[in-house]
């Protein structure tokens, strides 16, 4: 089993995240627009027409995937700090991903401790766990178990996301969170985990990952608990 404590400090590059992402959306859209121009040619043979339409479809899907990894919930430039009920926010994310889990024959178990809140931007928090849980589901193409647990200590709230999926090698774990690192070919953006690391860093949290190839992965997130007399 490999273990990796992720150093969120080294992620200064995440500050340029917004610029990188809009570039990643603009590129496929520019390509799609180009092929739509070509499709306007009335003498274009049918086989070319089909080919170009397929390219337009793929480019639009590619832009959509980037938007999903980054902008499902909000415009990420804006930061609204709120008192977040972890259980409530995670339940909402799980409900959004239930159809995807069903599609992958993945069973979800949630075990949430009752007390405690953290401080953060609701939409970013949800985006973070959407990306993590989506990856967990996608790691189980032949079905499996997804378990989401929260635990509270005196100072911290720990969120544990476990899957029985393909797992990662030590080398793959080290690359996790690097921009554009993906093992999913055209179906991946390699931006989801970069977004996760950036959000966790901004929330003063930590990430730890345990993974075993062929048997699964567990992510441990820890966030400082909001204190009773703390003001936002
Ligand atoms: P994408 O999902 O678009 O590939 P991400 O940044 O979300 O990009 O994830 C990067 C890579 O990290 C994935 O391609 C996958 O190889 C690996 N990964 C992330 N989460 C898991 C997981 N739960 N199990 C196995 N591999 C994972
Ligand atoms: Mg992903």
Image (cartoon, grey):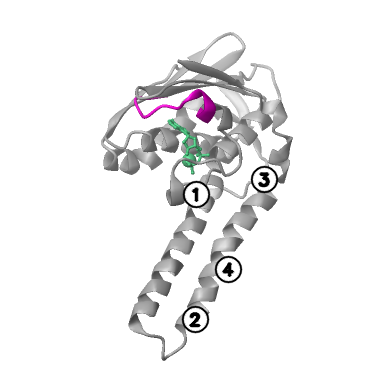
User: Which of the marked residues, 3 or 1, is nearer the chain's N terminus?
Assistant: 3
Whether pointer 3 and pointer 1 mark residues with C-beta atoms closer than 8 Å, the reply is no
Q: Please provide the residue range marked out in magenta.
A: 162-172
User: Which of the marked residues, 3 or 2, is nearer the chain's N terminus?
Assistant: 3
Cα–Cα span, label 3 and label 2: 32 Å
Label drawn at residue 17: 3
Instruction: Classify mark 2: helix, strand or loop.
Output: helix
| Depth check, front residue: 112 or 38 | 38
User: Which of the marked residues, 1 or 2, is nearer the chain's N terminus?
Assistant: 2
Camera-nearest label, 2 or 4: 2
Residue 115 visible to an observer of this rendering: no
Q: Which residue is mark 1?
A: 68
Determine the residue positioned at 66% across, 24% down: 7
Label drawn at residue 24: none
Is residue 25 left or right of 80 when viewed as pictured? left
* 165 versus 76 height, above or below: above
- Mark 1, ligand 2, within 8 Å: the answer is no
Image x and y of residue 159, in percent: 49, 21
Camera-nearest label, 3 or 1: 3
Q: Which residue is mark 2?
A: 38
Is residue 112 left or right of 193 when viewed as pictured? left
User: Which of the marked residues, 3 or 4, is nearer the chain's N terminus?
Assistant: 3
Camera-nearest label, 1 or 2: 2
Label drawn at residue 30: 4
Camera-nearest label, 3 or 2: 2
- Mark 2, ligand 1, within 8 Å: the answer is no
């Amino acid at each position: 089993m490999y273990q990796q404590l992720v150093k969120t400090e080294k992620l200064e590059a995440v500050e340029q995240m917004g610029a990188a992402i809009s570039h990643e959306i603009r590129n496929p859209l520019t390509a799609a627009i180009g092929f739509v121009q070509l499709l306007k040619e009335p003498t274009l043979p049918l086989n070319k027409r089909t080919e170009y339409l397929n390219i337009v479809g793929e480019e639009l899907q590619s832009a959509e995937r980037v938007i999903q990894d980054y902008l499902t919930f909000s415009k990420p430039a804006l930061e609204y700090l709120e008192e977040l009920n972890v259980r409530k926010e995670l339940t909402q994310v799980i409900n959004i991903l239930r159809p995807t889990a069903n599609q992958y024959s993945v069973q979800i178990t949630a075990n949430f401790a009752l007390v405690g809140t953290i401080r953060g931007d609701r939409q970013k928090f949800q985006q973070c766990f959407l990306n993590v849980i989506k990856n967990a589901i996608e790691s189980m193409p032949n079905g499996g178990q997804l378990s989401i647990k929260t635990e509270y200590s005196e100072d911290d709230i720990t969120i544990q996301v476990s899957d029985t999926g393909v797992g990662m090698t030590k080398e793959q774990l080290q690359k996790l969170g690097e921009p554009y690192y993906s093992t999913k070919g055209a179906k991946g953006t390699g931006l989801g985990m970069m977004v996760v690391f950036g959000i966790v860093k901004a929330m003063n949290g930590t990430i730890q990952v345990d993974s075993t190839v062929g048997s699964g992965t567990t992510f441990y997130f820890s966030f400082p608990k909001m204190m009773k007399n703390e003001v936002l």
